[in-house]
Image (cartoon, rainbow, N blue to C red):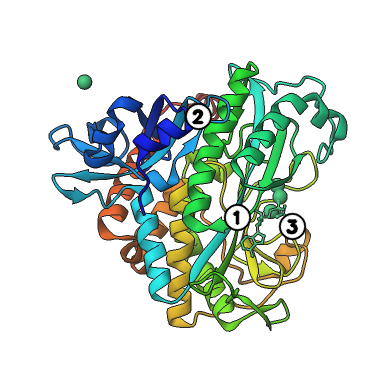
Amino acid sequence: MTQSLEEFARASGVRYFMISYTDLFGVQRAKLVPAQSIAMMQDDGAGFAGFASWLDLTPAHPDMLAVPQAQAAIQLPWKPEVAWVPAECVMAGETVAQLPRTVLARQIAAAEAAGLRIKTGVEAEFFLMTRDGLALSDPYDTAEKPCYDQQALMRRYDVIAEICDYMLALGWNPYQSDHEDANGQFEMNWDFADAMVTADRHSFFKFMVKSVAEKHGLRATFMPKPVAGLTGNGCHAHISAWSLDGRENRFAGDGYGVGLTEAGFHFLGGIMAHAPAMAALTNPTVNSYKRINAPRTTSGATWAPNTVTWTANNRTHMVRVPGPGRFELRLPDGAANPYLLQAAIIAAGLDGVATRADPGPRLDIDMYADGHTVKDAPRLPLNLLDALRAFEADTTLTEALGAEFSAAYTRLKQGEWDSFVSHFSRWEREHTLDI
Ligand code: ADP
Ligand code: MG
Ligand code: MG
Ligand code: MG
Ligand code: MG
């Protein structure tokens, strides 16, 4: 049942719709459409020149039409006369297959065909910086172990409570917010839901956090490692799979010493098998690789993984099984595209279920202190190029995600890497000038 956006506007007092799509680099692109024109746009879509965003299209391609997905509309709590509506795109009558939201929709359909309804939650950490993004916004937030710092949390109460109030009003059931492990860093948690609902909310959350921070004269960043030496912005993903009616958690059992079913165990096996390739999506920027494989931070731990290992309730591995019926992937960072993050997890997990993949031994050691004692633990990619090569080499994953998408993504990200390495750095001069 598709609701009429025109009626939605009348009932809610919305004056403008923000028809929005997320491109391959995770950037949200929008057109603002007055309510009186929304009926036409809901049928035909809003026109965009695809080349002007990161979609691997050329200037010669015909117009791309962004068709608003009305059931996912969210009224902006901080500007109720505007509603954000995520779109899926059509070009010359064909679905734009590489659009991240479409890539995810196809993975959700594949999971349903396998009898699984995927439910996920994300923990999108962020820093509050000064408006220019150059410094932490709170000069007094300097503790060596700043996690859960009550005083620093209260100095940002106006921002955090405003965002939490909005999530309460939207019915997301936010249940806690805290100061995180880096100076200037916060996390806000809301309830898990169907993968697409979580991906849309995750997108909207980033938009909302940035908007509210701006309102308060600040800059919010989800950048993976915005400050050298401090803990970075993770975006842990929690995953479970349910019966199609949503009643029974198909991962909840009593197996493997951690409360997983066979399906959960093999899904996890798929995540482990494809992790180095998945990193190209879960850790998609040059900066991402300063968060994983990182030296110890000033707080004492990075809280980010270095190896493809899994464990029970222990935060030093790539996957943690905190309790029965779900697992936590600690690999993704704040730069992960909300749709591609979920799509990568589902594609890798479904392959694991289909091939009955074995996740390998559960390791219960402190991986930061004793990782060297595990001789054969696979390492995560060391940089974006390494990850892109792993992604290209993993044809099971690239085919599962779709050939058009995988080719487009690899091409654009390779271009980003090339741009990075062609940049002359101060480090290079300092290390090479006198050779
Ligand atoms: P932690 O910091 O211990 O990793 P948080 O409470 O910050 O945990 O985040 C946990 C996330 O996992 C929340 O989004 C929560 O709703 C989600 N979650 C809890 N149970 C499940 C489940 N069965 N399936 C998917 N996500 C879940
Ligand atoms: Mg124009
Ligand atoms: Mg958390
Ligand atoms: Mg956290
Ligand atoms: Mg976590």
Whether residue 252 is situated above or below residue 141 in the rendered picture: below
- The answer to the question of whether label 3 and label 2 lie on touching residues, with beta carbons closer than 8 A, is no
Q: CA distance from mark 1 to mark 2?
A: 41 Å
User: For mark 2, does the 10 Å Cα neighbourhood hold few (<14), some (14 to 19), or many (20 or more) residues?
Assistant: few
Per the image, the residue denoted by label 1 is 121
Whether residue 177 is situated above or below residue 160 in the rendered picture: below
Question: Can you tell which of label 1 and label 2 is closer to the viewer?
Answer: 1
Residue 428 numbered mark, or none = 2
Name which residue type carries label 2. Answer: Glu
Residue 210 falls in image quadrant: top right
Per the image, the residue denoted by label 3 is 368
Q: Is the C-beta of the residue carrying label 1 under 8 Å from the nearest atom of ligand 1?
A: yes
Instruction: Determine the secondary structure under disc 1.
Output: strand
Of 383 and 226, which appears nearest the observer? 226
Residue 251 seen by the camera: yes
Name which residue type carries label 3. Answer: Tyr
The residue positioned 69% from the left and 36% from the top of the image is 164
Taking the image as shown, residue 39 lies to the left or right of residue 235, namely: left
Instruction: Determine the secondary structure under disc 3.
Output: helix
Residue 422 seen by the camera: no
Instruction: Determine the secondary structure under disc 2.
Output: helix
The residue positioned 43% from the left and 40% from the top of the image is 26
